[in-house]
Amino acid sequence: MNSRERVVTALRHKPTDRVPFDFALGFSPYQLAQFKAHTGQEDPNDYFGADVRGTSIGPTRLKTDYSRYIDPASLPAHAYIDEWGQGHIPTESNDQYHSHLEGYVYPMLGLHSAKDALDYPLPDIEAKYRYDQVALDIARHHERGLAVMAGMACTIFEVAWYMRSMELLLMDFVDNQEFAEVLLDRITEKRSIQAQRYAALAPDVIMFGDDVATQRGMLMSVGMWRKWLKGRLARVIAAARQTNPDVIIFYHSDGDATAIVPDLIEIGVDVLNPIQPECMDLFALKRKYGDQISFWGTLGTQSTLPFGTPQDVAQDIQERCEIAADNGGLLIAPTHMVEPEVPWENILAFVESVKKFHR
């Protein structure tokens, strides 16, 4: 069984030779440097034999001027403005420990009306030229027997608040609803086209996601999530499925999203990620929903992976593999990026334990 067969089979709730795995968001810059020092290699996925590779749309050719919304002169020298107009302030380059962390500058802070939301320039993520590399990536990885996931994280809610700020967007949901409707509908329309473009190229998995939960429960009420985000997410998923009914739909939200699991199943989500063990109970979810949805992640990056022993990591992997032995439904991965605090021995224990456990 090659990696592609293993991943698709497991996520369709059937037994496999072993549980598939990957490294989720990858290695932090510091940890990647440590990997290279230990192995002399460049790619942890290839070195460790991870089962999944990712792809996403190529860079835009547009040169949109967002200076009306953010004054470039007000940003630090190392900051940049992305294709959505959002300002990013990376960690200083001399701090390689957590250098993937950034500060944000919100371009839509001064906007108020529905016309403002309608006039704001959005990127050309629907443009066909941006999918040329996606097609090449899928063909190349499939030729190697690897599963491919096409990424569309920060699908609607996150990309909206990255422009507007979370505080103002949540306030818009209550007292500036016309603005919020125009903004979210415009994003949803573009994401629906992106989902169709991806699905037509036949990756194994399409990744959707918005962080809508904290580790103490939903970030907003379930009712508010249903009103503003559920239907729009359903439209994007339906657009992918209309083009490719067989594509596997993956949904990511950090935190405890247990309250909306039935809703996600209802609108067509096949896989939930990352199932943080610090706040979600994988075993309870598997018992209750395991015949309807699969789980991807589950290895705690706030607990076992950085602070456990290699034996703790191996035990966690053993327990997770056992619940997937008969009917699949699991792909094991760290629940977030492999951060600098993770000992090298724990990374080895993770990979070795997954590969060692067979049905």
Image (cartoon, rainbow, N blue to C red):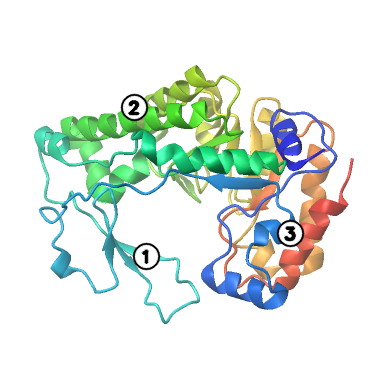
Mark 2 lies on a secondary structure that is helix
Q: Tell me if I can see residue 166 in this picture.
A: no
- The earlier-in-sequence mark between 3 and 2 is 3
In front of the other: 288 or 337: 337
- The earlier-in-sequence mark between 3 and 1 is 3
Residue type at mark 1: give it: Glu
> For mark 2, what is the residue?
227
Residue mark closest to the camera, 3 vs 1: 3
Q: Position of residue 277 (x, y in %)?
A: 64, 51
Which numbered dot is residue 48? 3
Query: Is residue 338 left or right of 161 when viewed as pictured?
Result: right
The N terminus appears in which quarter of the rendering? top right
Query: Is residue 330 left or right of 230 when viewed as pictured?
Result: right
> For mark 1, what is the residue?
102
Q: Quadrant of residue 231?
A: top left
The Cα atoms of the two marked residues, 2 and 1, are separated by 30 Å
- The earlier-in-sequence mark between 2 and 1 is 1
Residue mark closest to the camera, 3 vs 2: 3
Query: Is residue 178 left or right of 18 when viewed as pictured?
Result: left
Evaluate if marks 3 and 2 touch, with contact meaning CB atoms under 8 Å apart.
no
